[in-house]
Structures are given as structure tokens and as C-alpha cells.
Amino acid sequence: MAPRTTRPQSSARGHHQSASPVGTPTRGTTNPNRLRRMDRWIAATHGPALRRSPEPPLAVDLGYGAAPWTAVELLARLRTAEPRTRLYGIEIEPARVEAAKPYEHEGLSFVHGGFEVPVPGRVTLIRAANVLRQYDEEQVAAVWQRLCGRLAPGGLLVEGTCDEIGRRHVWVALDGSGPRTVTFATRLGSLERPSDLAERLPKALIHRNVPGEPVHAFLRDFDRAWAAAAPYASLGARQRWIRSVRDLAADWPLTDGPRRWRQGEVTVRWEALAPRG
């Protein structure tokens, strides 16, 4: 279903409410700690922006699913970077919002809504995990634009996908100017080869993992670097990953360094992987 354009209205609570939420329900699948890799990356890389906010920074967990665990966990992890952080969990299914209400506490609220992001003011962070998988690739840009329109200056949208227990993630980070980076993150002990992450590419890239597309070339080169680093496997999967990423950096514009690589991550500039055509 394509995103609909609706005119915001003000509610008695001061939130910007649409006549009807924008978007369609997800399956709602969720598990505790499923999004831990994404959360830790956000806290580490976006923590300075949270701390710079003159007002208590506002974060959103968009489409948190059938249970509130991911929203509760995201707030806790963000507060390690900035204790003033507040968070809204947003769900398009009213029953899921009602089920989450008992978990509200200071700084954490749950509201009914969708891509219109019905919270007061602009937000410092929106996390949309496993939300756009059901949409067509052609719809992604409009959703990104709409969500980025709700960001405060310096705000960040993190949109991506992970497996059911959080071993493998790929996400895109965007700001008000559009997509900036793509991050690949994995539990290294479960990885046979880096291209295993292809099944978790976000909707904007998953259908582009074919010859002739940059993301396909990136994963091909990553597999080659991984194979060349096989001697490092005797030192552990982490050392093999770090060696592979160092080799990858010779040909691809990576934005992070060994401190993040040790976590089983690598981040590359969006323009290097952006779809052609």
C-alpha cells in the first residue's frame, strides 16, 4: 500500500494526529534483544547529537510490533548516551498500543500512528526496523522523505532489517538531506561468509543484489576479502572480520574504524551502494 498524504490535526494532548494512520500493519514479529546491534550503533554514533540537543531529545521506535520490548530496550540504550532522552513507541495497530500501555513509564509512551509520526515537535531519532519489508521498492523513497521531514536539525532516521533473533542486520542511516550510510552488522560466530547478510538488505537494496549493481559488487568483494583472510580464522572470527574489512577499505569508502569493526560491523557511504537507474 502506498503511503497516503493526510493533513495533520491537533489533538487535545497536543500531538499531531492524522485522520487515519499512514501505512499498513506489519506482521508484528518481535523478540527481546532482537535489535541490540542496531541500538548500540545508534547510541555510539548518534550519542553526541542527542547530547547536543538543548531540550530533552525525543526518539521514536516506529512499528515496534506486537510487544513493546524493542522500544523499552531502545530507550534504555539511548539513555546510556543521554539520560534526558524520551521515546515514543508508535504502532498502527490499536491493539498493540493498548497492550504496550502498562509498560509506559517516565520518558516512555506508546501512541497509535504510522508514517506521519504523531508526536509533538520534531524528533532527534526515528528507528524503523523491519517496517518496509512489505512495501514495494518504488515506495521506499517517499517513506524516507516523509520520515526525514519529521526530523529536527541533526536528527537521524535508521531504517533496516534483521533476522528473528538479531544475529544479522543491515540498515540505512539518513538525515534531512537523504541517505548517508549503510551498515552491515552480524554475530561473527554465526557467519559463514559476508554475503550471508544479503538476505537482510533493506528494501531499497535487496532487489539490487544482482550483477551490475554496486551492492552486489560490494558483497562480492567482501566475500573475496573474507576468503583471503582465512588464515586469521585461527585467531578467531573477530580477527578474520577485521582483516577482511581492512582489505575492503582499499576499494570502498568505509566511514568507521576498528572500534566498530570489532563489534562485527562495517559502515559504507550510501553513494557507493546506491542503486543504479
Image (spheres, grey):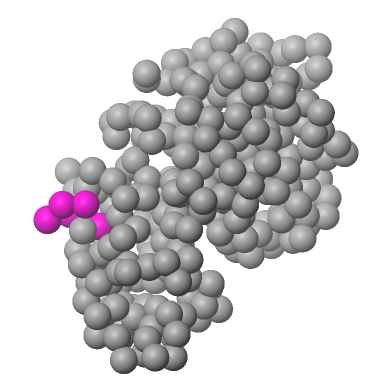
In the rendered structure, which segment of residues is drawn in magenta? 209-215
**Image point 75% across, 12% down: which residue?**
11
Q: Nearer the viewer, residue 76 or 12?
A: 76
The answer to whether 141 is drawn above or below residue 79 in the figure is above
The answer to whether 50 is drawn above or below residue 115 in the figure is below
At which x and y percent is residue 123? 66, 39
| Quadrant holding the C terminus | top left
Residue 101 in magenta stretch: no
At which x and y percent is residue 27? 48, 28
Q: Nearer the viewer, residue 71 or 153?
A: 71
Q: Is residue 213 visible?
A: yes
Q: Nearer the viewer, residue 189 or 253?
A: 189
Does 225 sit left or right of 103 as displayed? left
Residue 240: image quadrant is bottom left
**Image point 72% across, 54% down: which residue?**
78
At which x and y percent is residue 248? 31, 77
**Image point 81% across, 28% down: which residue?**
102
**Image point 32% across, 42% down: which residue?**
204
Q: Nearer the viewer, residue 8 or 195?
A: 195
The answer to whether 81 is drawn above or below residue 109 in the figure is below
At which x and y percent is residue 58? 73, 41
Residue 3: image quadrant is top left
Residue 239: image quadrant is bottom left
> What secondary structure prevails in the magenta region?
loop
Residue 212 in magenta stretch: yes
> Residue extending furthest right?
106
